[in-house]
Image (cartoon, grey):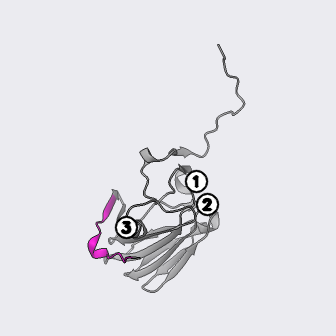
Amino acid sequence: MESTSVDDLEWTEVDHGTTRFRRMRLASAARDGAPAPDDGVGASLYELPGGARAWPYHYHAGNEEALYVLDGTGLVRGPADETERLAPGDFVLFPTGPEGAHRVVNDGDETLRYLVVSTMRDPDVTTYPDAEAVGVFAGSPPGGDGSARDRDTTGFYPRAERVEFWREVDDA
């Protein structure tokens, strides 16, 4: 067993308009980059600057997430557009399914710093209600070490789109 220090790790950054944050994958680093075993643990440290938002409003079909606030304040949007104030020491559990829908928002000026811990079940489907879309992840769970090119299947699709499964196929 070896410890992992955030002082030895690098941040990755996401910047898409108001969705803007830094993330450090702690569990991945502790495993030396090896993928999490199915039902393993994922853990990431996040820094959300003032006025920014984290991942779009979403919930997972297969993975629970939990958030623990280290520094700063903000809001978490939950199901039915409920919002809850976040402050240091707060812990929020996001179960699977619509009752675990969430998005973290920093409505202040100071950086919001928090830890997210999750199960790492593969495959997973993530639903994005505001975008009326779903994300499909197989081969590495969302938040895992696998990139889109490493996964067996990955993509984002409109929820309303349907393909007729039993459509006729021309064998010629």
User: Which residue does the numbered mark 3 point to in the structure image?
Assistant: 29
Left or right side of 58 for 22: left
For label 1, count other residues whose C-alpha is less than 10 Å away and answer few (under 14), some (14-19) or many (20+): many
Percent of width and height locating residue 42 = 48, 67
Q: Secondary structure at mark 1?
A: loop
Tell me the distance, in whole angstroms, between the alpha carbons under discs 3 and 2. 23 Å
Furthest toward the front, the residue is 1
Residue found farthest to the top: 172
Residue 85: in magenta span? no
Tag 1 residue: 123
Give the foreground label among 3 and 2. 3
SS at circle 2: loop
Q: Amino acid at mark 3?
A: Ala
The verdict on residue 8 being magenta is yes
Q: Secondary structure at mark 3?
A: helix
- Identify whether 154 is placed above or below 71: above
Q: Which residue is mark 2?
A: 62
Q: Amino acid at mark 2?
A: Gly
Residue pictured at 46% horizontal, 75% vertical: 75
Q: CA distance from mark 1 to mark 3?
A: 22 Å
Where does the image place residue 95, in percent across and percent down from the top left? 61, 69
Q: Residues within 10 Å of mark 2 (few under 14, many from 20)?
A: some
**Nearest to the observer: residue 127 or residue 41:** 41
User: Three-letter amino acid code at disc 1?
Assistant: Pro
The region drawn magenta spans: 2-14
Q: State left or right for residue 139 relative to residue 29.
A: right
The quadrant of the picture occupied by the C terminus is top right
Residue at 49% across, 57% down: 142
Residue at point 48% right, 80% down? 85
> Alpha-carbon distance for marks 1 and 2?
7 Å
The image shows a total of numbered marks equal to: 3
Q: Position of residue 87 (x, y in %)?
A: 44, 84
